[in-house]
Amino acid sequence: MSTVVFEPTEHPHRRRNALNGDWVLVSPHRTKRPWQGQIEKSAQENRPSYDPTCYLCPGNARAGGKQNPQYTSTFVFENDFAALLPDGPRGEVGVGELFQAQAETGTCRVICFSPRHDLTLPLMELSDLRRVVDVWAQQIEELGARPDINYVQIFENKGSIMGSSNPHPHGQIWANYTIPLEPAKEDVQQRAYYDRHSRVLLLDYLTQELEAGVRVVIQNRHWVVVTPYWAVWPFEVLLLPRRHVLALPDLTGDERDALADILKRLTTRYDNLFETSFPYSMGWHGQPTDGQRHPHWQLHAHFYPPLLRSATVKKFMVGYEMLGMPQRDITAEQAADRLRQMSEVHYTMVGDAA
Ligand code: ZN
């Protein structure tokens, strides 16, 4: 039996994700060696502002024969290769206890963030980012009002390493009848906490994170970015509003402006980390759109970046992580510290201001 006192910066341990109930194995002793810094850079991409072969650029033809309008800010359209279809049967379609299935219906849309093929969120103007925020909120309002849609999942898959097929700045919406697995797990945990304490889980979490400080990356008047205590992905962050907000459409104008600000600052820090256009999957979680009020819910965004040590060293979920549980070497505290050290001037702009 060991008599050594547990030290979370030294000893392997597991942390519980209070938001979805999962656990992650943390192995901080494996990063005791000093940081090697950035080893290799990805080739600098020089994309044109308009690409005649891009199916998201204004005026271009999409697969299936439709043509994009000459849009000048954001542009939303129904995905030509939707994973969900609006019309179809509903109900149980499985056979017996061991072969259960349910029919699923829904809608998939694409949101172009900008007509400019060469931009990404950190390189967009604040006023244009604000338009993206407004489109997110408007889409949740519009789709969520439909009786056949009980959850609207907004997300962005950025970078070919994450399987994004097109570098044109865009996100997606999948909206469906049932509540998907991740928000459903978060619903269970947030509801249980609310029932126990009559308090909102993520508001209490944020208060304690702000007190501790070690995992806070950046903040402004309405928003805070933390590397969550239970982070699995390298440089994973949670973006939280300071006040109790159930869903994106509830944000005030000032909160939306502040969201544009913190999105630009966060994604700039990400890009500066390895001087690359930082890949990630990000998305919004808010209350279901089933017509009920869910006061235990708190709006938040997750960013899940796969890069570990450089522009080319990627985390894969393999081996023990597929068969046992997720594992990470860099602690959430170390990741927050690295992100805090980053500049908020985009690396491609350094020198331009002089
Ligand atoms: Zn979530």
Image (cartoon, rainbow, N blue to C red):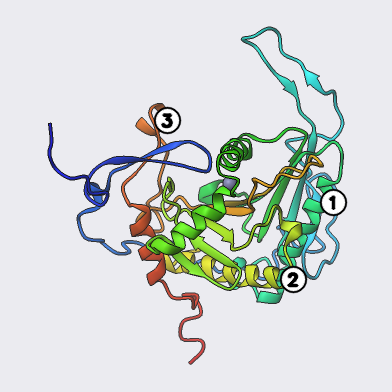
The disc placed on residue 322 is 3
Q: Which amino acid does label 2 sit on?
A: Gly
**Looking at the image, residue 327 lies above or below residue 32:** above
The tag earlier along the polypeptide, 2 or 1, is 1
Residue drawn 74% across the image and 62% down it: 57
The answer to which of 117 and 126 lies nearer the viewer is 126
Distance of mark 3 from mark 2, alpha carbons? 43 Å
> For the residue carrying disc 1, how many other residues have a C-alpha within 10 Å: few (<14), some (14-19), or many (20+)?
few
Q: From the Cβ of disc 3, is ligand 1 less than 8 Å away?
A: no
Distance of mark 2 from mark 1, alpha carbons? 18 Å
The answer to which of 180 and 20 lies nearer the viewer is 20
Q: Mark 1 points at which residue?
A: 142
**Looking at the image, residue 59 lies above or below residue 220:** above
Q: Residue furthest front?
A: 197
Q: Which amino acid does label 1 sit on?
A: Glu
299 relative to 341 in the view: left or right: right
Front position among marks 1 and 3: 1
